[in-house]
Image (cartoon, rainbow, N blue to C red):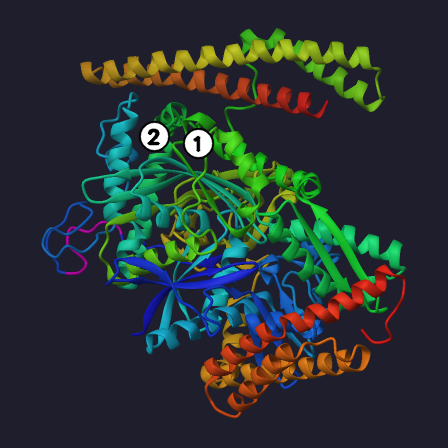
Amino acid sequence: MTTGTSSAKSSAAACWSCGAAVSGEQFCAACGKIQPPAAGADYFALMGLPRKLTIDPGELETRFHQLSWKLHPDNFVRASEYERALSLERSSQVNDAFRTLREPVSRVEYLLAQAGMRREGQQKQQAPPELLEEVFELNESLDELRGAQQQGGDAPEMAALSRRLQTARVNFEEKLGEVDRELERLSAEWDRELDAGASESSQRKLMERMNGALNRRSYIRNLVQSVQKELAEA
Amino acid sequence: MGRTVGIDLGTTYSLVGYFDKTAGRPQCIPGPYADTLCPSVVSVDADGSVVVGEPARRRLLTQSARTIYSVKRLMGRGVADVQSELALFPFHIDSGSQNVIRVRLGDRVFTPPEISAFILRELKGWAEEFFGEPVDRAVITVPAYFNDAQRQATKDAGRLAGLEVLRLVNEPTAAALAYGLHEQRRGRVAVYDLGGGTFDISILKLVSTGEGDIYQVLSTNGDTHLGGDDLDNCLLVIARDEIRIRHGLDLEAHAETMQGLRKAIIRAKHELSSAARATVMVPLPDESVYIREITRAEFEGLVQPILDRTMGPVQQALEDSRLKPSEIDEVVLVGGSTRVPLVRRMVEQFFGRRPHSELNPDEVVALGAAVQADILESGVKNMLLLDVTPLSLGIETMGGVVAQIIPRNSTIPASAQEMFTTGVESQTGIDIHVLQGERELAKDCRSLARFQLRVPPGPAGLARIEVKFLIDANGILQVAARDLKTGEQQTVEVQPSYGLSDAEVEKMLEESIEYAEQDFTERQIIEARNEAEAILRATEKSLARLASEAPGELPEAERLAVNAAVSALREAVPGGDYKLIRARVDELNQATLPLAERVMNRAVSSVLTGKRVTDV
């Protein structure tokens, strides 16, 4: 681990090297030097894509490759320290953008985070009301299994508990699939709204629904993971 | 400015390569023994002079307390990490070691990066001798699954050896680069790399674009403590136990015999790659001989559990790349241990296709490093490597839980911004603990570093410090912090958990100048002469022994051949031509092979008939 200082110069209107006018391009048109990234450019813009949630994976990858080809630190090994820092900043942004936009779920999360609607740590705690009963049952089974393990429960009892958990796991995995399909539908709706030039308040409402779906998804996924872990240990 | 080379700094062997522009392909550079493989063995003399490579390896048998091998296993690790290995590796860890191991060689103490630097400096010498020009920059390969501390230790070693490290490249990625260039292949490639001490699996996608070829790593996994060494140790433990039972001898007290046994076991392992059976034969300190035949079937039965440990990472890497074994277009084998037929069968069975091994599995990584070195040096690019970070990066939060901020298999460079604020009033600092690993709790992950953010005094939650974590193209973490209220950049004093601070490296660099100034050629001459002396002494002893015990057993022709080789070597020793001395040492070695066999056979037959010769 080394200590570094990132280049904090924000995008100026003039090229840092030759002084020609620049406005957020990767390279100065006049002298060809790499430029600092524009402040607040979002991942969609960075990849040259509209803020839509349906993304062709092939197209995203092609853009990722094109940008990497130009901005990767390999190209700047012999350049000045400042240019090397810019390349590091620019290429890491491209990689972060690719990683985020590649997955449909992280794509939606990113869109909502940009709109200030998603904060880390807020979405995981509460059980969605419609799942309360099933979650209660599941937690009971988990407790029983743990208790039985601790007391060295007999084999038939353990097997029965484990079967109950298996059933619950399948059930919640199905629910996870349902949420994913819901997110897909909402994503398609978002794209249609953007195309139709929907009002800000209507976009906001849609985002609220996406946020709800994401919270549900994250809750169910945690459940599935803890059941999987418990079953693996049993 | 000097030249740039590619270096494979391996557990067992290290190599140096360059890109031959005339031939249009990478080549490995041979050393003074005309071999491209430099044993990763370092030995330190009583006078402080350092011996590296083949002559150091020979000293394992005679001066084991001054000689170290497999030092790569110690890179970037703390004393607590290596306890289990100390039973099998004769590392003399200095008692003062904690989070940076210090190894005792004779009466000197070194850190693993310093020892690795000796190997790098040796290879630098090979290349300088070969080019007739100075070499000052290098691309060095590391196991893909190396963590931050292991990478930083490798980079420090480069710096200590007087090399600017242009890039650390992951070994399987370098191999894929060499293969892609050689075979002109495209598609999805799995690289299975089982070396002397480390195992990596990488899944790559090779894409041709309008500008050039892109080698994009999709996922990687591995085990930085799994390799050919472990196969050797498995056999070593068995042999050691058998010797204790059958001969009543505890080899713990006989380091040199232990090294002799290890050498014989490695030879047998190599033989079993092509033969159905092999024999381990080692003279013991009590003048008896340990003889043990091993069949390939027995060998495979013994090492299967070790090799099975490679399959977990293989499955995880595939899962992470969201591919099924059948979706892999090519499988490439890298590393000396993939010569073991069982490895080939396991890999072939898993992927359902015959793996490639056309390129020399010992050289392929260095060849790839040489290609990358050329791209970085010349600035002419026709290909691009996009590698990933092997381990998730996280920070410790409340209750010792890790919050993941950069997931494993993210293309590097990769970054994450985190906002920090104060929890209580008048708090002046925020402690941050950075970790690497996949587990939920900080105590189960690898601690990378700790640092403290300074905050201006004020009410709780008012401060806004943005910390940027960035994994650079070498897979090494950089940290920068900014006070969002003032916009001021904050210098972060990072204390690495397992590594040397900049000041320590700087100090070592000063101290290492005495080693750097030892002239390469002069060193080679001294080493060659020492070797000549050793073999001349050994030859005389064997001749005398045979003459006294079995006069007339040595045929006249053999005796004449040995004598001729002895005189030829004696003539060469006073001269300054180390290559000639080495060539004559090899000739004498050849000439004395039948002699050595006779001495050994006599020892064996005396054991088999229950008799003991007085002086074998």
The answer, for residue A14, to whether it is visible in the render is yes
Of B113 and B547, the residue lying toward us: B547
Taking the magenta stretch, the answer to whether it contains residue A232 is no
Q: Which residue lies furthest to the bottom in this view?
A: B574
Position in image of residue B463 (x %, y %): 47, 46
Q: Quadrant of the C terminus of chain B?
A: bottom right
Q: Which quarter of the picture shows residue B354? A: top left
- Residue ID for mark 2: A101
Against A220, is B383 above or below?
below
Q: Which quarter of the picture shows residue B373? A: bottom left
Of A133 and A175, the residue lying toward us: A175
Task: Assess disc 1: are there few (<14), some (14-19) or many (≥20) residues with their C-alpha within 10 Å of its C-alpha.
Answer: some
Position in image of residue B297 (x %, y %): 68, 39
Tell me where the magenta segment starts and ends, as one range.
A10-17
The answer, for residue A38, to whether it is visible in the render is no
SS assignment for the magenta stretch, majority: loop
- Residue ID for mark 1: B321
Task: Assess disc 2: are there few (<14), some (14-19) or many (≥20) residues with their C-alpha within 10 Å of its C-alpha.
Answer: many
Against B155, is A176 above or below?
above
Q: Quadrant of the N terminus of chain B?
A: bottom left
Badge 2 amino acid: Leu
